[in-house]
Every structure is written in structure tokens, then in C-alpha cells.
Amino acid sequence: MNAAMLEVRDLSLAYGDVQVLFGVSLRVDEGEIVTLLGSNGAGKTTTLRAISGLRPPRGGEVLFSGQSLLAVPASKRAEMGIALVPEGRELWPLLTVRENLELGAYTRSARARSAANLEKVFRLFPRLRERHAQMAGSLSGGEQQMCAIGRALMSEPRLLMLDEPSLGLAPILVDQVFDIVRTLHQQGITILLVEQNLQKALEVARRGYVIETGSVKLSGTSADLLADPAIRSAYLGL
Amino acid sequence: MQRFTELVVAAVLLAGLYATMAYGLGLIYGVLRVVNLNHGGIIMAGAYIGWLLHEKFGIDPYLSIPVVVAVSFVLGIAIYRGLVRHLPRGPAGAVQSLLLLFGVWLVLRNAAYLLFTGNDQTIRTEYSTRSLAAFGLAVSVNRVAVFGIAVLTLVVLHLFLTRTFTGKAIRAVAQNADSCTLVGVDVERIYSLTFGIGTALAGLAGLLGASLFSFNPSYGSGDLLKSFVIVVLGGLGSVMGTAVAALILALVEVFAILALPAYLTGAVGFVLLVLVLVLRPGGLFGQRVLG
Ligand SMILES: Nc1ncnc2c1ncn2[C@@H]1O[C@H](COP(=O)(O)OP(=O)(O)O)[C@@H](O)[C@H]1O
Ligand SMILES: [Mg+2]
């Protein structure tokens, strides 16, 4: 029995008066790749923002390695080993690629190993090494995604959450992103992957959750979900 | 030709002071999106602190720089933590922060009237009237000193923002605050630090200005407006852009003396501001945020 690394229980959240999460529950065990699926506006990004602390939930519980996160300020969660690659990259466009990566190692513990980790990121993404002195805002979409993943890796996360990393990328780059997710997983990082590309996400993930209008409608192993007739018709157009 | 050179030199020397005060306003706006309407109040406070230290303890105004910078830095942090932080962020809080900081300015100004009366004051030192002769030009020692300190301040600030981890975090917060939180930056701490630095620059500018000009409790309002003009002209955050914009304003002001009656020279900054807003609404150097 694996220990739960991340456990979200009955999470609800509202933007002002508009409630968008209605009791989301999910868990990610140590060493897993889990995917969170659902169509646009279902509440995937909001769920990740609540886990990383950017948006306080209205109710429910978020546990990381058994410890409640609700009292932990967002800026302290990186230090605990939680990293998010946000939807749309959200780089600092007028800082160089190198500065973006170095700031990724802002926490005290990560800063001590920043140079070694930068080298690792550059080995994983040789493209970023070539462009290290360029403004991040001048990178292509694929390079920006690499930079955003690299920045998250600089904090040495135990749990890496990726929000639609393949969004807006050319097919060949999409494959590359999923390869990277696999590689990182093999290196021992636990992964929570948000995707709209169900087919590809379920190929890399062990389990998945399907979220619809703010609550989990289906969950199961990837094989089960791929075989589910409701999913096949609603999301895969089969 | 001689007169022309004199005016250009005068403008360059003045531009250092202008850049220092404008950078404080631009830094706070660039990072927090708050227009620090109390900028003028702090400029005035910096002038009076320097004056008090000189009158009461005979401290040379240049030696009181560390005190003025430290006091205004702490004052800035106190204003941020005590007041500004509690307002809503973004457009919702914009009007509130304007009113609030304007209120703080009124309080400071009236406190100064109460404490020091409305009389004009000057900081007179034994070198106040001395000047240096170089290349056939005579320039006031004070003006050269103010320019030197302003340039040094801007260079140090530039190095801080571009070379240190904290400085980079300040620029990063200006560009994307949530991403900073995600990597572990305490964004509130950066806001508070930035407000302190911007306020300290205003205090320093007030002290430097007070060693050149006379002042009273209303001192600082003209400088706030000049800072606006420079920020709009020079864009946010780039030290170079701010310096160039400060020089443009100083040149226009200095040469306006030749062409306009004295009571109109104060208005040239606004004419410049209006011209820029009409012709290049994004500022001369675009909208770069602390790049
Ligand atoms: N900042 C916000 N303010 C108000 N409503 C928001 C905000 N962000 C997202 N929403 C709404 O919350 C719902 C869920 O959005 P989101 O979590 O981004 O979905 P997903 O990532 O699954 O596409 C949507 O209806 C969206 O319009
Ligand atoms: Mg989303």
C-alpha cells in the first residue's frame, strides 16, 4: 500500500459569488502519474491553484504527505516539495531564460543546489542552454513550455503538477512534452497532469479523474477510463 | 555658445535629481500598480529631516543621507503595512489607494505647517555658494555633489535589481506575481520592500533638492508632477529610460527659461506630458515593466 502524497478531500471553491468547485476529491500516491481530465471550464486549473495555495478554498481539505496544507501559505509550499507548471507557462517575459530558471530555485534548500540543478535542466532541455541569455518572452511556445517545466524542476519538487503542458503546441512538440513527463516520472517525481488531450494523458498516466462542472464524475485506472463508453463518446469522439 | 553650454550642463546636473525621484515613483507603480500620491509628502519630509539635523545638530546635509534614507525607508514600509496592504489589489483598489495616499500626504503637509510654519527654509552650508570652474564654466559645488550622489544611487539600484536574487525577485513580481509565489517568493515581503525603497528614493530626492532650493511644507508637489512626466516618458523600471526622460524634462525646463516668462516655465512639464500622451501614449520607450 503506497502512502498518499497528495490527498484532496471534498474541495469547494468560489470566485466571488460564483462557486466553481463542488467537492472535488482525489489522491495521488507516491511515485504515481495521475491525470486530471475534463473539458474547458470544468475546474481543473482552479483545483491546481487551490492545491498550490494561490486561491484559498471555501471548504474541504488538502493534505500533502498527511499534513494539512490549508494553514500553509502558498509561498511555503515550494519548500515542501510542491511545484506547479501553470497553464499558459506564466514565465517572467522580461527576465532571461537563465534568470527564470535561477529564480525557480528561490527556496533556501533549492538555492544551495541551484548550479547543479541548472546543469540538469540544461541537459534535459539543450535548447534552453542555447537560449539561456535570451528574454523568456522571446522564446517559441515549445521553448517557453520547456522553460516553465525547467523552472518548476529547479525547486526539486516531489510532486510536480502540470496544467495542460501540451496546450497550443505543434504535434511533434506535444509528443516531446509527454516524453518529458515520462522521463521525470522515471527520475522519481510524482506527477499530477492536467490535460484535455485524453488519449495521450491516459497513455502516460496510471490512473485518472474526470472532472465536470466542478466535481469528479469518473475515476479509475487509465485502461478502465479508456474503455468507458461515456468517455469514448464525450471526450474521444468515438 | 557659452550660454548654451551652461544651460546644457545645468540641465544634466538637474536630471540626476529628477531621475532619482522619478525612479522611486516608477518602481512602486511598476511592482505594486499603486500610484504613490504621497511621493511629494515624503520628498518634503526628507527636506525637513535634513534641515532639522542641520539646524539642531549642525550635521552636514550630505552626511545625513543615511539617516534620511533609513527613516523614509521605514516610513514607506510602515505606510505599506499599515495602510496600502489592506486595500483591494488591481483596478478595484486604484482609486482607494490614490485617495488614501493623498490623505497621507495632506496629513504630512499639515503636520509640517504645524511644526515648522509655512515659511521658506534653506539649508545653508559654508559651501552653499561655492562653485567649481572647469572648461571656462562655473558650476555650483552643490549641484555637482547632488548629481554625483544621484548617479551613484541609480547605479547601485540598477546593480541591485539586475544582479541580486532579491532584486531579480522584485522585477519578477512586477512581471508575474503568482509565478513568484509558486517558486517560494513571499510576494507581500517584496511589495513591502519595494514600497520602502521607492519611498527612500523620494526622501533622498527631497534632501538633495533641499540642498539646492528653498522649501516649505508644500514642497514636493511640483516634484511629484515632474516624476509623473518622467515615468510616462521613460517607461517603468528601466534606469536608462528614466535617466533619458529626466534629461529631456530638465533640458526642456532649462531652455524654457530663455523663451518663456518665468511664471510659465513651471508648465512646460505638462505640455511635454500632454504631447507625449497624445503622440506616443505608450511612452517614449514603450511599456516595459522592470525588464
Ligand atoms: N479568476 C476567475 N474569476 C472568475 N471565474 C473564474 C476565474 N478563473 C476561472 N473561473 C471560472 O471557473 C470555472 C473553472 O475554470 P478553470 O478552473 O480555469 O477550468 P479548466 O482549467 O478546467 O478549464 C470556469 O467557469 C471559469 O470561467
Ligand atoms: Mg485550465
Image (cartoon, grey):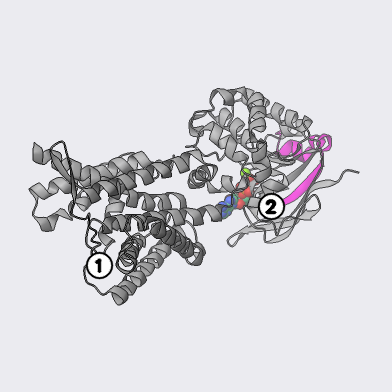
| A137 to A106, vertically: above or below | above
Residue type pointed to by label 1: Asn
| B178 to B79, vertically: above or below | above
A191 within the magenta span: no
| A188 to B91, vertically: above or below | above
Range drawn in magenta: A215-237
Name the residue at the bottom extreme: B114
Residue A92 rendering spot, x and y as whole percentages: 52, 39
The answer to whether residue A156 is left or right of residue B48 is right
Between marks 1 and 2 in the image, the one whose residue lies nearer the viewer = 1
Discs 1 and 2 share one subunit: no
The label number, if any, that marks residue B216 in the structure image = 1
Name the element at disc 1.
loop
Residue type pointed to by label 2: Gly
Mark 1–mark 2 Cα distance, whole angstroms, equals: 60 Å
Q: Which residue is at 38% across, 53% downward? A: B201
Chain ID at mark 1: B
Q: Which residue is at 41% across, 56% downward? A: B66
Can residue B287 be seen from the camera position used here?
no
Name the element at disc 2.
loop
A227 within the magenta span: yes
Can residue B115 be seen from the camera position used here?
yes
The answer to whether residue B204 is left or right of residue B222 is right
Residue B132 rendering spot, x and y as whole percentages: 19, 44
Some atom of ligand 1 lies within 8 Å of the CB belonging to the residue at label 2: yes
Q: Which residue is the site of mark 2?
A: A214
Q: Where is residue A113, by image quadrant?
A: top right
Residue A210 rendering spot, x and y as whole percentages: 74, 44
Depth order, front residue of B26/B134: B134
Q: Where is residue B51, by image quadrant?
A: bottom left
